[in-house]
Amino acid sequence: MTLKSLIALAGIVAVACIVTTFSQSLSGFNTSQCGGTKRCINIPENCQIQGNCQYQISYAPSRDGKSMIIELFGRRDSPQMQYVAIGFSSDARMGNEPVAACIAGPNGQAQLSYSYNQEGKRNIPLGPINPSDAQLLSSAVTESSIYCQFSQAINPTTNPSLPNLQRPFQLLVARGPVQSNGQLGHHTSRQPTSFMTQMA
Ligand SMILES: *[C@@H]1O[C@H](CO)[C@@H](O)[C@H](O)[C@H]1NC(C)=O
């Protein structure tokens, strides 16, 4: 290999590294803390190794121990995919569970929105949530991903529909479009995790 091609190769590697670091910080979800300061759920399983995750969830206790800091990441395969959500379910089926959704907004930011899947799958917004029970901490929206980091009270006190995080849940992940009234549209992709998760 000539010196010139070696320099060119080094240049390509350097650019690739910068692009990788940049896209990771843009998309928000930092996998290097998984298993350390936070627990992570990767969907499909072990997708973080290949970098082809469709969804990623993490959770860690807040400093005061009253909340969990939750991260929710979803890959976007089209601009119409405008939300990623987790349902806190007692089983693998949709119906009768609270849902936390991260909804893409303008300027690369997202909003946190809570709703409830009734029996029969109707999704009803819970309206504004008291910040003591849940609030958005940071968000990032790119062409290929939606990400939210939020705190959620372990024992919510202001809305009985919110989940108590000391209970085990089968987490359901979903993503899809948003309706013109701002409510979650029917998901284009949905899947249950195959295990129960007790965050707190
Ligand atoms: C990810 O977390 C590690 C460990 O906390 C940190 O060193 C690194 O800078 C973070 N990466 C990004 C892109 O924020």
Image (cartoon, rainbow, N blue to C red):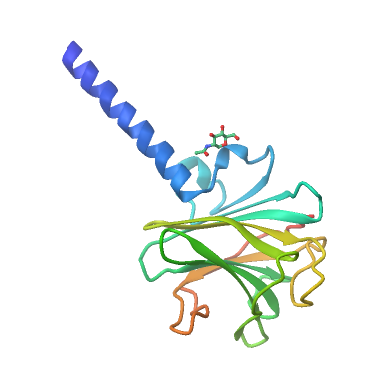
On screen, residue 197 above or below 39? below
Please provide percent x and percent y for residue 123. Answer: 60, 82
Choose between 119 and 151: the one closer to the eye.
151
Which quadrant of the figure has residue 91? bottom right
- Residue appearing at x 82%, y 60% in the figure: 166
Q: Quadrant of residue 17?
A: top left
Q: Residue 157 at what x, y percent from top left?
A: 82, 71
Q: Position of residue 83 (x, y in %)?
A: 49, 68
Frontmost residue, 45 versus 9: 9
Report whether 126 appears left or right of 85: right
Residue at 74% x, 66% y is 133
Residue 85 in the image: above or below residue 6: below
What is the number of callouts on the image?
0
Question: Nearest the camera: 190 or 101?
Answer: 101
Regarding residue 199, the answer to whether it shows in the image is no
* Residue 69: percent from left, percent from top: 69, 53
- Is residue 195 placed above or below 189 in the rendered structure? above
Query: Quadrant for ligand 1?
Result: top right
Along the line of sight, which residue is nearer the eye, 62 or 89? 62
Residue appearing at x 21%, y 22% in the figure:
8
Which quarter of the rendering shows the C terminus?
A: bottom right
The residue located at (31%, 31%) in the rendering is 15
Q: Is residue 5 visible?
A: yes
Q: Dividing the image into 4 quarters, which one contains the N terminus?
A: top left
